[in-house]
Amino acid sequence: GSVDPRPYYAGWIRWVKAFVPKTTGPDVSRPLADYVGYDTVPVGGVAEVMKLIAHVKDDLPVVECPILIVHGQHAGTVPLANAREIHDTVSSHDKKLVILPRSQHVVTLDVEHEVLEAEVIAFVARHRKTWA
């Protein structure tokens, strides 16, 4: 899909409209009885996240620690290109990008949450002696 340009203008839009309708669809690909999602997006929050992204993006090459990046293939909230850019830009020698082909944005609750859990456990197990 195409990239939604509105987040890039959120700093200005926030002064006109505090909330906009959510247009990215659901955040999980399976029905969950206890999942709470929102119909709107707080524009001020988006503006702050965009400022944070701009700040962090410049520092990605400084990251040298082991890193695990996990992204749902069908996430509408954050483009998959962002996960690939993080992977390709950090200086870490131990880095892994996991794309969950059936998942959306909230990978911790989506259909491949067990794959996510296994990846995180393996990552922590590989590095726990280093962190101790």
Image: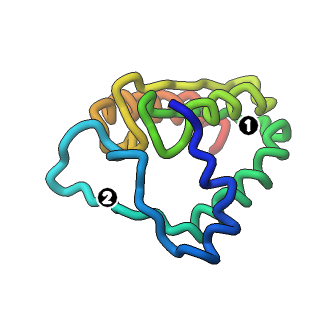
Query: Picture quarter containing residue 21?
Result: bottom left
Determine the secondary structure under disc 1.
loop
Nearer to us of marks 1 and 2 is 2
In the rendered view, does 18 fall on the left or right side of 100? right
Q: What residue type is labelled 1?
A: Cys
Q: How many marks?
A: 2
Q: Position of residue 1 (x, y in %)?
A: 50, 30
Query: Picture quarter containing residue 14?
Result: bottom right
Report the residue marked by disc 1: 65
Q: Position of residue 45 (x, y in %)?
A: 57, 67
Does residue 54 sit above or below 31 in this rendering? below
Mark 1 neighbour density, 10 Å: few (under 14) some (14–19) many (20 or more): few
Residue at the location (14% across, 53% down)? Answer: 33
Image quarter where the C terminus lies is: top right
Between 39 and 60, the residue placed more toward the observer is: 39
Determine the secondary structure under disc 2.
loop
Report the residue marked by disc 2: 37
In the rendered view, does 74 fall on the left or right side of 131? left
Does residue 105 sit above or below 92 in this rendering? below
Between 27 and 95, the residue placed more toward the observer is: 27
Q: Position of residue 59 (x, y in %)?
A: 83, 46
Does residue 62 sit above or below 15 in this rendering? above
Q: What residue type is labelled 2?
A: Gly
Query: Picture quarter containing residue 118?
Result: top left
Residue 91 shows in the view: yes
Residue at the location (39% across, 37% down)? Answer: 104
